[in-house]
Image (cartoon, rainbow, N blue to C red):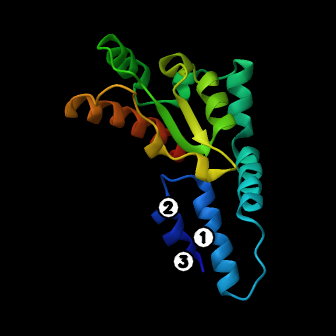
Amino acid sequence: MQPLVDAFVMRLTGRQTIYQMIQLAEEVRRRGGQPLDPVVYKHRYHELLMRRIHGRIADLAAGRARPDEMDGTGQPRFADGLRRRGVVLYLASGTDLPFVRHEARLLGVEHYFGDHIYGALDDYRSFSKQMIGPAHPPRPRAARRTAAGFATALWRSRKSRR
């Protein structure tokens, strides 16, 4: 069973958590079970995740840990450089929006993104990372790659701590 779960989790990594939970419900159904609503599974996942990372979040909130201790990638320097060059930064995560906003605030990166912080909603059809982007014409290819690299670095940093 573990290889099956690993395969669908890896296939769906980078998408909203709900898609992994939809797949979980489908796997329960395939095996003759009566699955719960995928949103119920997602909320349970978040409860378990919060138990696991609560100490780090509490340490950040209480000032016992510094954001730079949670990030070894130099992201703030990179973000400062992008902002100086006029790049509008977006933080888009498959993690639920309240968690994304809270962690961005604790990590001290919220100001890089302003109103451009996005995350998953229980009504998962109302949000996807593909919906996010500037209202103005696309930036040159190199700038898009650079901004995407920063978002990917943030995402990888968060995923590796789970």
Task: Measuring from the top left, give residue 10's x and y in whole percent.
Answer: 48, 63
> Which residue is drawn at the image coordinates 49% and 71% (left, top)?
7
User: How many labels sit on residues?
Assistant: 3
Q: Residue at x 45, y 29 (%)?
A: 90
Residue at image mark 1: 23
* Tags 1 and 2 touching, CB below 8 Å: yes
Is tag 1's residue or tag 3's residue first in the polypeptide sequence? 3
Residue at the top extreme, as displayed: 84
- Kind of element beneath mark 2: helix
Q: 82 or 70, which is in the foreground?
A: 82
Q: Which of marks 2 and 3 is nearer the N terminus?
A: 3
Residue 42 image position (x, y, % from top left): 71, 56
Q: Which residue is identified by label 3?
A: 4
Nearer-N-terminus badge (1/2): 2
Asked if residue 93 is positioned above or below residue 20 in the image, the reply reads above
Residue at the spot x=28%, y=33% of the render? 144
Q: Mark 2 points at which residue?
A: 12
Question: Which amino acid, mark 2?
Answer: Leu
Specify whether 104 is left or right of 157: right
Q: What element carries label 3?
A: helix
Say if residue 162 shows up in the picture.
no
Nearer the viewer's eye, disc 1 or disc 3? Answer: 1
Using the rendered view, name the quadrant where residue 108 is placed. Answer: top right
